[in-house]
Image (cartoon, rainbow, N blue to C red):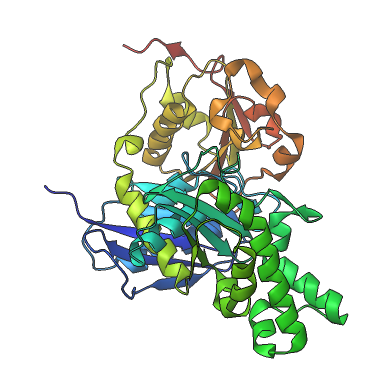
Amino acid sequence: MEAPNVSLGLDVGGSHVTANVVDMSFTGERSLSMVRKEIDSFGAASEIVAAIADCIMEALAGREPVAGIGIAFPGPFNYAKGICTVLHVGGKFERMFGLHLGQALKDATGMPDTAFRFFNDAHCFAIGAYARNRLESKRTVFLTLGSGFGSSFMENGALVTHHNALPGSGAFYNEPFGESIADDYFSTRWFHHAYKQATGQASKDVRELAEMDSEVSKGIFHEFGANLGRFLLPWLKKFGCDELVIGGNIAKAGHLFLNALENQLKPLDCKVRVVLCDDTEACILTGAACLANREGEASDNAVESTDPAFDTGLLVERLRHEKTAAIDGFEVRSWEFVRQKLHAALTAAGRNVLWYDIDACLKTPAADERHLGDGFHSLDDQKMRVLRPDTSADLCIVYGTGAALCGWEGKLVNLDSDLEMKPVC
């Protein structure tokens, strides 16, 4: 049977989640029929999962199966594994820290065989904006200006995450500018600070500031545009950018800072076309759906492992009456293989599990590159204090090498010694 040519795109934000089914055979701009649900990003993990799942189910109601589900999620996030690692962004999503969100959504939607894939929201914006605006630029820089300073890059229509002309992190937000970093200057925080500094009054949001149409507000937007141009000038020149696409809520006031921005970019050898994008959300949804469709099915198959087999029945018995548990072991080569196998057994036994990856607590962000020899010494004490189970859930399990150190109450299982290990036949 031929695979469906439609995918579902989701955009998860701090106050809402939006979904839309996208036909992959269609190119260009069109209006989207969106489903939007409110979300409490400060809520419990199970509440957030339920809100996202409800949005998915409503968007798919009465439709044919989709090829995949692409989810644009703000960082930090382990996009490859589907693990939420959001931390220090005002408390948003912190009660999901370490959660295997991909597995949780498969369970909550009753769609275990559907591919759930996660992507950086700035990357989704770039893919969607390029397609919807029928761009043909060779080297394109995309910015999303809102609560944070998002950025992404394309070369001949393909995403670029590593390039000798771009920041080593693959993004602008953490690059030095002024007295701190770019994220402090090109986000809504800067407007709040600038207005307070200019008037001594409580800060205004960007839309209200734009509607003031006063000398103060005009000066603030002019300064913002000039700062943005000064920051971008050396990067655009080095990258050879020929098109700059700006989205996000601040872009809706682009007419107030565009001239100041373009004046700062005049020293460039070649003129850069600036595109103000007023359909950022539609671009993100389109991009998420497109990326989900492109990824292929390899990452969705159960991973293979050379790990010894273990008695899943015994483990199910040990966890039958538990609310929380930790599963540890130094000899495990593929924790995802172990997790999938245990999840199937526990689900068959009627337990609904939320899984938490101890690797979210690594001191370095490169969780997938950790070597077994590093052991628990590479875990961050502060992150482990944030990694907490959802007390309203049926069963929460933290898993991985070092999981025993998380301090959760409940059953501790060590796969190296507690269970009978048998070679895989």
Q: State the residue at coordinates (55%, 37%).
A: 164
Observer-nearest of 59 and 367: 367
Quadrant location of residue 20?
bottom left
Q: Is residue 172 visible?
A: no
Position of the C terminus by quadrant = top left
45 to the left or right of 106 = right
Q: State the residue at coordinates (51%, 52%).
A: 152
Is 329 above or below relative to 89? above
Quadrant location of residue 109?
bottom left
* Residue 40 screen position, x and y as percent: 59, 66
* Residue 61 screen position, x and y as percent: 29, 67
Q: Is residue 366 visible?
A: yes
Q: State the residue at coordinates (45%, 30%).
A: 336
Is 209 above or below relative to 124? below
* Residue 195 screen position, x and y as percent: 79, 77
Observer-nearest of 419 and 34: 34
